[in-house]
């Protein structure tokens, strides 16, 4: 079991804190001969597979490295366009590592804003008056848990579906936020959280939650 990441979103929908605790890396590396039997395209400045799943390589996976050297977006380490590079027969055989690309900072900001909107829509669609909004979303690979405070701050945790004790963890994170962000004289409300003590206590709480799965009084 694992806790994947933590997000803190302010009442306006802005991402003010994000921490990746554990990111599973589903990667596959294979040596190809010419011509490449996968169809690649450029998407959001990354080269991704658009057609041709095989040997653990899936549609949507991005090119992470070529011949053991990490790529830089849509370019090789030498600054060559990856798509053009792979069209040249003289560059084969070539070893390519594919996997899910990590989200950029801008993508995380956009997703936080989108969830903020979905949370509000969920609250408005509820047949019950005064609904709190979305508290959990479940997929086959993870669960998204959300706790919104009375002041509108949202604490979001992505975790393994089998991970227990998330409700207690969310309230523990709120407690850490109150103690080490709100009580910090240099912290401004609604602004990004940059506090070493906040980071340290959050990481410690995530470790406890993963091992024990629960939070008792005074933990």
Image (cartoon, rainbow, N blue to C red):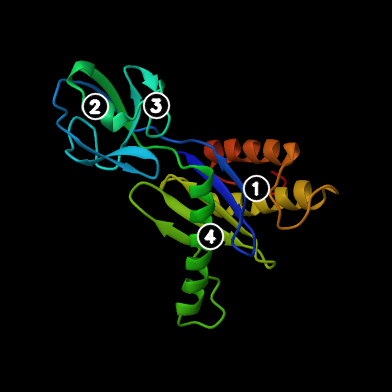
**Distance of mark 2 from mark 4, alpha carbons?**
37 Å
Among numbered discs 1 and 2, the one appearing first in the sequence: 2
Q: Secondary structure at mark 4?
A: helix
Q: Which residue is mark 1?
A: 216
Q: Is residue 211 left or right of residue 193?
A: left
- Within 10 Å of the Cα at label 1, are there few (<14), some (14-19), or many (20+) other Cα atoms? few
Position in image of residue 49 (x %, y %): 25, 39
- Which residue was labeled with disc 4? 113
Q: Which residue is mark 3?
A: 71
Seen at 58% across and 41% down, the residue is: 19
In terms of image quadrants, where is residue 148? Answer: bottom right
Assign the N terminus to one quadrant of the image.
top left
Q: In which quadrant will I find the C terminus?
A: top right
Give me the C-alpha separation between circle 2 and circle 3. Answer: 13 Å
Q: Which residue is mark 2?
A: 86
Query: In terms of sequence position, does the residue under pointer 4 or pointer 1 come before the other?
Result: 4
Q: Are marks 3 and 1 in contact (CB under 8 Å)?
A: no
Rounded to the nearest whole Å, what is the CA distance between mark 4 and mark 1? 32 Å
User: Label 3 crowding class (10 Å Cα cut-off): few <14, some 14-19, many 20+?
Assistant: many
Relative height, residue 118 to residue 210 (above, below): below
Mark 2 and mark 4 in contact? Answer it, CB < 8 Å: no
Viewer-closest of 118 and 216: 118
Count of marks overlaid on the render: 4
Left or right: residue 41 versus residue 171 is: left
Marks 3/1: CA–CA distance: 46 Å
| Precedes in sequence: disc 2 or disc 4 | 2
- Residue 77, by quadrant, is top left
Depicted 74 relative to depicted 160: above or below: above
Is 129 situated above or below 161? below
Please tell me which of labels 3 and 1 falls first in the chain.
3
Q: Residue 42 at what x, y percent from top left?
A: 32, 41
Tell me if 84 is positioned left or right of 9 in this view: left
């Amino acid at each position: 079991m694992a806790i994947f990441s933590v997000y803190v979103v302010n009442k306006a929908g802005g991402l003010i804190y994000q921490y990746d605790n554990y990111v599973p890396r589903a990667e596959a590396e294979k040596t190809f001969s010419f011509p490449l039997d996968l169809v690649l395209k450029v998407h959001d400045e990354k080269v991704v597979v658009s057609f041709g799943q095989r040997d653990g390589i899936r549609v949507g996976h991005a090119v992470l490295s070529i011949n053991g050297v990490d790529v830089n977006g849509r370019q090789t380490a030498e600054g060559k366009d990856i798509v053009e590079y792979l069209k040249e027969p003289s560059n084969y055989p070539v070893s390519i590592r594919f996997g899910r690309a990590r989200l950029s900072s801008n993508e995380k900001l956009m997703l936080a804003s989108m969830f903020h909107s979905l949370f509000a829509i969920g609250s408005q669609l509820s047949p019950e008056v005064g609904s709190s909004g979305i508290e959990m979303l479940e997929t086959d690979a993870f669960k998204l848990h959300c706790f919104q405070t009375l002041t509108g701050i949202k604490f979001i945790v992505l975790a393994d579906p089998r991970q227990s004790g998330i409700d207690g963890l969310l309230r523990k994170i709120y407690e850490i936020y109150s103690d080490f962000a709100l009580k910090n004289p240099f912290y401004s409300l609604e602004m990004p959280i940059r506090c070493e003590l906040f980071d340290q206590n959050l990481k410690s709480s995530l470790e406890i939650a993963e091992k024990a799965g629960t939070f008792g009084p005074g933990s």
